[in-house]
């Protein structure tokens, strides 16, 4: 029985032959490939496979109970005793007037000489 040590993500349409049958793995899903399959696919299409990275798993939203309303602190909306308000933001400091300072005067206006 052949081993499939390379778990890669299919990025484009790929077909492999296993046990005399054509297998087309789903795009953007992890699939186990043999070394020979990897070499053949990447030789024909270098962008056809990619290594898996830490990705957000697909979440089935129907698994969640939408009757419970949970806050960020883990409590329900009816329990506001632990909620704290964020401190009010301080206003930005006023901008300084822009004009010529004594260091930026042209030499013709310098009277200190």
Image: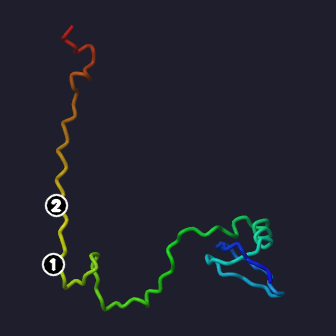
Q: Which mark is residue 91?
A: none
The percent position of residue 93, horizontal first and vertical second, equals 18, 46
User: Which element carries disc 2, helix, strand or loop?
Assistant: loop
Front residue of 3/84: it is 3
Say left or right for 43 vs 103. right
User: Which element carries disc 1, helix, strand or loop?
Assistant: loop
Task: Please identify the quadrant where the C terminus is shown.
Answer: top left
- Name the residue rendered at 43%, 86% in the picture: 61
Task: Please identify the quadrant where the N terminus is shown.
Answer: bottom right
The percent position of residue 5, horizontal first and vertical second, equals 71, 74
Toward the top, the furthest residue is 113
Say left or right for 27 vs 109. right
Residue 82 picture quarter: bottom left
- Name the residue rendered at 82%, 87% in the picture: 19
In the picture shown, does residue 95 fall above or below 85?
A: above
Rounded to the nearest whole Å, what is the CA distance between mark 2 and mark 1?
20 Å
Front residue of 98/43: it is 43
Residue at numbered disc 2: 88
Q: Which mark is residue 81?
A: 1
The percent position of residue 8, horizontal first and vertical second, equals 66, 72
């Amino acid at each position: 029985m052949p081993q499939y040590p390379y778990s890669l993500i299919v990025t484009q349409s790929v077909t492999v032959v296993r046990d005399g049958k054509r297998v087309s793995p789903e795009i953007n899903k992890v699939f186990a490939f043999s070394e020979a399959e990897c070499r053949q696919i990447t030789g024909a299409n270098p962008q056809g496979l990619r290594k898996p990275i830490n990705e957000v798993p697909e979440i089935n939203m129907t698994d969640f109970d939408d009757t419970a309303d949970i806050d960020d602190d883990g409590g329900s909306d009816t329990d506001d005793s632990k909620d704290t308000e964020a401190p009010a933001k301080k206003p930005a400091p006023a901008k300084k007037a822009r004009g010529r300072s004594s260091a930026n005067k042209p030499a013709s206006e310098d009277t200190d000489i």
